[in-house]
Amino acid sequence: MTPPQPPKGNMVLWDHIFPPLLDGSYRWRTETDVSYQIAAQAQGQPPQTQAQNLPEVQGYFNVEGPRFGLDASQIASVFPPKNGHGGFNESLPHVAIFKRTLPWERRLDPQEVLWNGEPPAAWNDNVPWMALLLFEETECTIKQKVAIGDALPAEVVKELAPAAGTLVNTVSASSAVVQSIMPSLEELSLLTHVRQVNVEDRELNAAGGDGWFSVVMSNRVPEEGKKYVACLVSLEERWDVVPLEPPPIAQNPFRPIPLPVRPPVGESKFVIPQRNIPRMPTSDFPISSAIRSQSLLQTTFGSIVGNYGGIEVVGDPGRLIFFFQNTFILLYSWKFECTQAGTFRELVQGLDDKMYGNPNTQSKPVLTDTGHLHMNVADRAGENEVTFYRGPLVPFQLTRDPLGPYHSADQCRRGSIETGGEDISYAAAFECGRLLAAADGRLAQDIMRWRREGYKVSLRTDSLNLVAKTMNLVQAADVHQPFAPLLAVSAIQSMVNPSLPVADPYQIQVAEQAPGMNPATLQQAWNLSSSQEAVAILGGDPGTLGAQVTAPAQTARANTTIDVVQKDIAGLNRLSGFRAQVLDNATTTLESL
């Protein structure tokens, strides 16, 4: 059951929202039991029940979600803003994701290796498979489209079992830095939550969507005057770098990493303290940035033999400097800069605008009891006039202006009852917004795109109106909906149920509309003396033009009898000769065939 939406201006926080199924491969199986009764063969005997079970059927399916990368379209918002500059030293960086169940769709430690056979705590199910790590720009190295087998240790790749040729983005940092900022299991569950807001709340739901967001926060607070890279990384099967318990409060912020112990006298191998887990911290590769040497270790003399994280180092004991790093799959990242810090009050008090003056000096501005400032403004005629201006920051409640939207700054000027003069506050705000918009390099492109789309819609509207006038549509046409299906349905409907009368089969009505068939037009074009002459040229018979024709008078003749026909011997002889000639021609034609 979906919970109701919170009121506007409020939000509801949830510890987690689990998906119905975790990402992975599943098998389904069905068994059908069928039974039927057979009528009794003899009276008084009960009917017999027979079983006819159907064969078992099974199949497989996969539940797949984002795993090796996160598209930017799935990110609702980030804080601090991408490429932002400001005093962010009092806030934890975080990222909001549109998909509410994404952080819990996979397991960080599917085999529960970290618990070493002991039952995990109740909050273990809440641990997400992703974390937001905050690095300084010099602390990490980001690579694009790297083969996953070249980026992660073989043990991790074996557990992930990715498809062949999978490319991922990676972020690498020294093991000391990673262990100092990596949250523990319990901290990961506390740094991730689900946020529900009202879908109509323009401030809290600025990114749109259904009002549900999963939020992943970092546990590192930015410091003033530094540049940072926020990295949303995957921790799936990376239980080797996640501590089981958070460090003590008094502990050094940089958690120590296990270092090789010098071997006893007579031994040739270094001994490395093992964690109470089957796998040592993996992805121990040499750091490729911010380190003066690219080698795994530096030695001043001799050779050593050692093992750390599955890497064999051969040589004699000597002075050693170890450099190890951890590499993670990078799901999403952004950069920002933490500039000089300060509270809102301190920033406002520090304003020194030449128009207003500095409130900390003798030239501080003089305001009325309503918060207005006297302003000398030159009008369009060049005359100076005294106006009043009041900014948006006032120590009392104000009502919104209900007269907008405006198309120019002059529309915002009005007389103020509070001051008895002209108030230019909204006019200044309008002009400030216009100048800020004009300073945006993409404004002209967006305006041109908006005009082009408007012209396209206008042209489409004109075309639809023209078609609607000449054809009976089954429903009204919408410029935002596909028109081809509506046109096809309307055409078929007009053929099945025609609304117009059947056209004349001889096309007489169409022919009458031709200028060449109109006697009056023909008389005027050829400069004829009368319309009767034009009628004669067209055929001479008015009946061809649809006029009523009177049959001419017939000459009276006497009735013809057989005796009269028999007396016409000459006519009969001509008829007999013509018949004989026709028969001879027909016989000759057949013989030739």
Image (cartoon, helix red, strand yellow):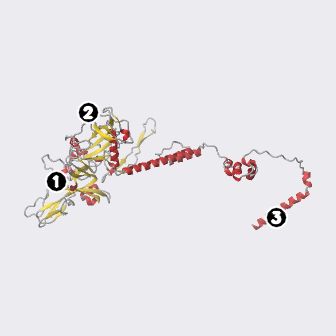
Residue 135 seen anywhere in this rendered image of the structure: yes
| Residue 544 image position (x, y, % from top left) | 73, 49
| Amino acid marked by disc 1 | Arg
- Image x and y of residue 565, in percent: 90, 53
Which residue, given by chain and number where applicable, does mark 2 sit on? 369
Relative side of 442 to 580, left or right: left
Q: Residues within 10 Å of mark 1 (few under 14, many from 20)?
A: few
Mark 2: give few (<14), some (14-19) or many (20+) Cα within 10 Å.
few
Q: Earlier in the sequence, mark 3 or mark 2?
A: 2
User: What amino acid is at disc 2?
Assistant: Asp
Distance of label 3 from label 1 (alpha carbons)? 125 Å
Residue at the spot of label 1: 275
Quote the CA–CA distance across marks 2 and 1. 70 Å
The quarter in which the C terminus is drawn is bottom right
Residue 393 image point, x, y percent: 27, 38
| Residue 25 makes an appearance in the image | no
Given contact means CB atoms under 8 Å apart, are the residues at marks 3 and 1 in contact? no
In front here: 507 or 585?
507
Label ID, residue 514? none
Q: Which of the marked residues, 2 or 1, is nearer the chain's N terminus?
A: 1
Q: Is residue 193 left or right of residue 305?
A: right
Question: For mark 3, does the 10 Å Cα neighbourhood hold few (<14), some (14 to 19), or many (20 or more) residues?
Answer: few
Q: Quadrant of the N terminus?
A: top left
Which of labels 3 and 2 is toward the front?
2
Residue 76 location, x and y as percent?
32, 46
Residue at which label 3 appears: 584
Q: Amino acid at mark 3?
A: Asp
Secondary structure under tag 2 reads loop
